[in-house]
């Protein structure tokens, strides 16, 4: 029996794979909505879904490229309290950077911002993982305030 997997099935295959399986296992997969029976119509639907997904991925990639170029032109200045020798009290987190970006109408989740140990005055380059293929570098400047 030939089936098209609707989701990943351990030991059998990944989503959208076309697999030849034994009749009993194929019926089990279909009954549990993990696969559909392979027909010309179901194969055509699969191909259309794959094309749509590719188009969406390309559009998302273009948007991320545009956002990357905008972010790399941007500079964020943050005033912080400092102690002796320019040492910052505490440190700047990805959440604070995300909030600064929101003030500038960029909705970027703090989870994709790679900001570690921003506790020294000066210029820091922060990585923002916009897409698995695209990483932007944002310039964050820490300035002594109070």
Image (cartoon, rainbow, N blue to C red):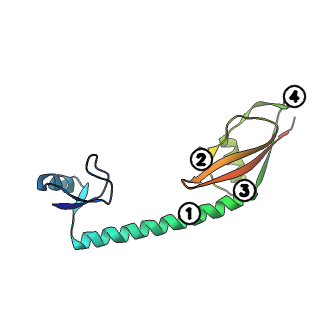
Which residue occupies 12% across, 53% down? 24
Disc 3 target residue: 72
Q: Is residue 21 left or right of residue 45?
A: left
Disc 2 target residue: 112
CA neighbours of label 2 inside 10 A, class few (<14), some (14 to 19), many (20+): some
Q: Position of residue 34 (x, y in %)?
A: 26, 54
**Contact? badges 1 and 3 (CB < 8 Å):** no
Disc ID at residue 85:
4
**Mark pair 1, 2: CA separation:** 16 Å
Which residue occupies 62% across, 62% down? 65
Which residue occupies 63% across, 46% down? 113
Give the structural element (helix, strand or loop) at label 4: helix
Farthest left residue in view: 24
Tell me which label, 4 or 1, sits earlier in the chain: 1
Give the structural element (helix, strand or loop) at label 3: helix
**Which quadrant would the N terminus be assigned to in this image?**
bottom left
- Residue 69 position (above or below residue 93): below
Tell me which label, 1 or 2, sits earlier in the chain: 1
Q: Quadrant of residue 22?
A: bottom left
Q: From the viewer's perspective, is the residue at label 1 or at label 2 nearer?
A: 1
Disc ID at residue 61:
1
**Mark pair 4, 3: CA separation:** 29 Å
Give the structural element (helix, strand or loop) at label 1: helix
CA neighbours of label 3 inside 10 A, class few (<14), some (14 to 19), many (20+): few
**Contact? badges 4 and 3 (CB < 8 Å):** no
């Amino acid at each position: 029996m030939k089936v098209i997997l609707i989701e990943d099935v351990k030991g059998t295959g990944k989503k959208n794979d076309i697999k030849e399986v034994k009749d009993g296992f194929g019926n089990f997969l279909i009954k549990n909505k993990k696969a559909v029976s392979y027909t010309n119509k179901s194969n055509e639907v699969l191909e259309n879904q794959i094309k749509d997904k590719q188009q969406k991925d390309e559009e998302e990639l273009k948007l991320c490229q545009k956002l990357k170029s905008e972010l790399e032109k941007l500079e964020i200045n943050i005033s912080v309290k400092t102690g002796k020798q320019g040492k910052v009290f505490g440190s700047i987190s990805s959440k604070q950077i995300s909030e600064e970006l929101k003030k500038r109408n960029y909705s970027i989740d703090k989870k994709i911002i790679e900001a570690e140990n921003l506790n020294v005055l000066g210029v820091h380059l922060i990585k923002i993982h916009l897409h698995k293929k695209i990483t932007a570098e944002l310039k964050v400047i820490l300035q002594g305030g109070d």
